[in-house]
Image: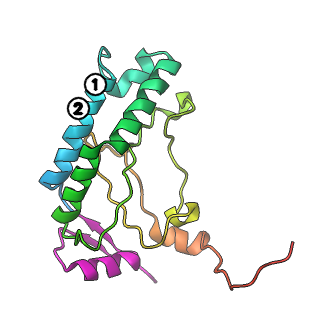
Amino acid sequence: MSFTPIYVNRRIQDDDRRRRISEGALFLYPAPRESLCITEWILTLVAESFHGVREARQAHEELASADFVARVSKLKSRFTNHPTTKRLCQDLIEAVGSDPERTYFDVPRLRVTPPVTISPPGVSYAYKPHRDTWHAHPSQVINYWVPVYDPEPTTVMSMHVNFFDRLFKMPQWDGTMASR
């Protein structure tokens, strides 16, 4: 029987944490000040993007679909590519104990997921169960998830590590080319 170790508030050396993560462990930490800075930055951008809307989290109900998509698209692009976002990500990397000289990061992605019943094109959707490596992410990638709003059971992701090992294990490439 295999199990997934879940470490809560575990302070260990960067190399040891990376090794354990690559073996399937999960690390949970309370929000460091640096992640709260990211959240505050996002909320500033959300307020600017949805100016005139009563509640940004219900903007999909108040705005025409095209207007909603246009605002979300601009918001996501601005967040992802803004120098402030990159600086805040670097601050978070250091706050969690990763060596900034040995840590590369991709630009972060802001997920905006309206209810599936109205999911307009151009906006994020609720992803089906997957491993990031199935979508060309290298196995060395370590993901950090920072919720913008307080999480609820219906607004978070689930981690089914053993489920994927049993049912969806990708075949290993043997170095040969298969004929068609």
Left or right of 73, for residue 173? right
Q: Residues within 10 Å of mark 1 (few under 14, many from 20)?
A: few
Q: Is residue 14 magenta?
A: yes
Residue at left offset 30%, top offset 30%? 46
- The answer to whether marks 1 and 2 mark residues whose Cβ atoms lie closer than 8 Å is yes
Q: Secondary structure at mark 2?
A: helix
Amino acid at the residue labelled 1: Glu
Query: Which residue is at 18% across, 78% downward?
Result: 12
Image spot of residue 22 (x, y percent): 40, 77
Residue segment shown in magenta: 1-28
Can you name the residue that lies furthest to the left here?
A: 33
Q: Which residue is mark 2?
A: 44
Badge 2: residue crowd in 10 Å (few <14, some 14–19, many ≥20): few
Residue 48 has which mark?
A: 1
Determine whether, in the image, residue 28 is placed left or right of residue 4. left
Q: In what element is the residue under mark 1?
A: helix
In the rendered view, how is the structure colored? rainbow
Q: Position of residue 81 (x, y in %)?
A: 36, 43
> In the image, what residue occupies the spot 47% across and 25% down?
70
* Residue 162, percent from left and from top: 48, 72
Q: Amino acid at mark 2?
A: Thr
Residue 168's quadrant in the figure? bottom right
Alpha carbon separation for disc pair 1 and 2? 6 Å
Q: Quadrant of residue 113?
A: top left
Q: Taking 104 as reference, is 63 above or below it?
A: above
Q: Is residue 36 in view from this perspective?
A: yes
Q: Nearer the viewer, residue 121 or 5?
A: 121
- Residue 132 drawn at (x, y percent): 50, 62
Magenta span includes 60: no
Q: Quadrant of the C terminus?
A: bottom right
On the rendered structure, is 76 left or right of 178?
A: left
